[in-house]
Amino acid sequence: MQQVIFLGPPGSGKGTQAARIAEILQIPHISTGDILRANVSRETPLGQQAKTYMDRGDLVPDQLVLDMVEERLKEPDAQKGWILDGFPRTVSQAEFVEEKLLDSDGSSSGGELQAINLDVPDDVLVERLLARGRQDDNEETIRRRLQVYREQTAPLIEFYSDRGQLHDVDGDRSMDEVTACLKKAIAPE
Ligand code: ADP
């Protein structure tokens, strides 16, 4: 069972690449940002609670996100593996993955988990995000999201590196080059 986590700052291309790799590996691409945005637009109770945080560029509180991910990973399609995009985003979320989500097949340890760090310089990130123009892609929110990434998510690079589960990939190249490199990193033949 292949379990892949995509790390990387906003604008690093992780959403695009996660979707491509999911297609190649034939496992679901689970984006917490996409699920949250769908809840916001459907005005569900979860969406109504999450919206304020998202509009500010802050993280949505763990208690909302953890339940949401746990439910999604119970779906039948996730039993043969998954790609998580945008989760975990904090050390406590990463610990939740270790405790609750790995080993659903009953095996002993999370040996098959792989984390990808898509590395892209800050000036390139800001340029890409401003060009994308999603609702939360204004300059102030972008600055806040990059700060949140550095403070809360970047520590996960060390977390997965310490466990020998990290692949560092240069994301400042063409989309096809990045995909090729990821393919090699995740599923070496
Ligand atoms: P990006 O990586 O471009 O910032 P995402 O689509 O992954 O965008 O996430 C958008 C927003 O959704 C985040 O700024 C945050 O408010 C919320 N969010 C997504 N994933 C999580 C998570 N794992 N924990 C808390 N909040 C999250």
Image (cartoon, rainbow, N blue to C red):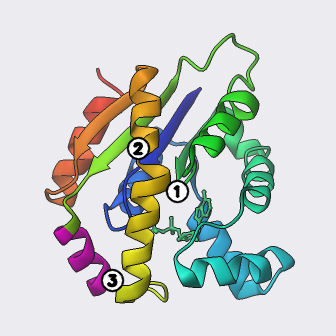
Spot occupied by residue 18 in the image (x, y as percentages of width and height): 43, 52
Label annotation for residue 86: 1
Q: Residue at x 47, y 64 (%)?
A: 148
Q: Amino acid at mark 2?
A: Ile
Q: Quadrant of residue 52?
A: bottom right
* Disc 1 within 8 angstroms of ligand 1 (CB): yes
C-alpha distance separating marks 3 and 1? 17 Å
Which residue is label 2 attached to? Answer: 24
Q: Amino acid at mark 3?
A: Arg
- Does residue 30 lie above or below 50 as drawn? above
Report whether 86 appears left or right of 155: right
Report whether 104 appears left or right of 145: right
Q: Which of the two labelled residues, at mark 1 and mark 2, occupies the earlier sequence position?
A: 2
Report whether 31 appears left or right of 107: left
Main SS class of the magenta portion in the image: helix
Q: Which residues are magenta?
A: 123-132
Label annotation for residue 132: 3
Spot occupied by residue 121 in the image (x, y as percentages of width and height): 19, 60
